[in-house]
Amino acid sequence: MTDITISPGLILVLSAPSGAGKTTLARRMLDEMPSAQFSISYTTRPPRGKEKDGVDYHFIDTKTFQQKIENSEFVEWAEVHGHFYGSSQSLIEQTREDKSVCVFDIDVQGGTAIKRKFPDAVLIFIVPPSMEELERRLRGRQTETDDAIRRRMLAARAEMERGTQSYDYLIVNDDLDKALNELKSIVVAEHCRRGRADLSALRLQNAETVSNG
């Protein structure tokens, strides 16, 4: 097996079915890690509800999205329900240069695309404690019809089957504080990985000399 080159910058991908609490966890973690950067995706779909450009998404038209593809500005992109979504390549480059942390809140398709390009990216899948609890959370939003919730539940099952088979870490979000602590523990552990830990002061002949973020 070929060794994976470890970058001092940490690429962190969070994925989960809708309703599992992924976005809440990401925001809580970022509140406690002010040096980390959040990847705001680009999309061609219109804003929903109170969504704001540059905060929730970068809202752009299809022509601009196509230009960004042609200019290789996306580390990953996909079409979902007739709209396009993409993640910035430049943020990863900046993260590696700054030896910092960038967080992607994307689906499994996007996460595995990033992993193919950057094998040292860390993929974390968030799951609900049960399918019944996931449905309860979705219904609690009171924003969708029964038919829409059924479609979301089917999509969630498919997403979980892919994510639990291919991701590096799994977190069951039964208790938000516990899940947050597990997420932060993963970040700490990854910063201690051979290749990210700063051993330069030891002046060892074969020591890794990168510094962590």
Image (spheres, grey):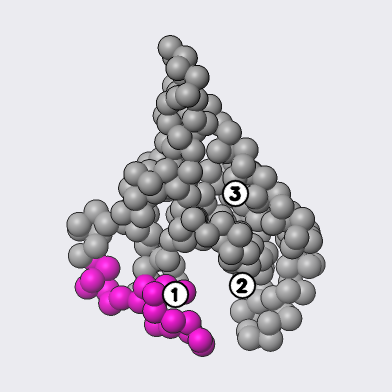
User: Does 200 sit left or right of 32 as displayed?
Assistant: left
Q: Nearer the viewer, residue 154 or 115?
A: 115
- Amino acid type of the residue that numbered disc 3 sits on in the rendered structure: Ile
Q: Which residues are magenta?
A: 45-66
Which residue ends up furthest to the front in the rendered image?
Answer: 201
Residue 140 placement (x, y as % from top left):
73, 81
Give me the residue at 56% from left, 57% from top. 33
- Name the residue carrying label 2: 151
Q: Nearer the viewer, residue 34 or 88?
A: 34
- Asked if residue 154 can be seen in this view, the reply is no
Residue 117 - label: none
Residue 80 painted magenta: no
Residue 55 - label: 1
Discs 2/1, front? 1
Q: Marks 1 and 2: in contact by CB < 8 Å?
A: no
- Amino acid type of the residue that numbered disc 2 sits on in the rendered structure: Arg
Discs 3/1, front? 1
Above or below, 75 against 81 in this view is above
Label 2 residue SS = helix
Above or below, 158 against 46 in this view is above
Residue 27 placement (x, y as % from top left):
58, 66
- Asked if residue 28 can be seen in this view, the reply is yes
Question: How would you rate the neighbour count of disc 3 (Cα within 10 Å): few for under 14, some for 14-19, many for 20 or more?
Answer: many
Dominant secondary structure, magenta: loop
- Give whichever of discs 2 and 1 has the lower sequence position: 1
How far apart in space, not on screen, are marks 3 and 2 (Cα)? Answer: 24 Å
Label 3 residue SS = strand
Residue 175 placement (x, y as % from top left):
79, 61
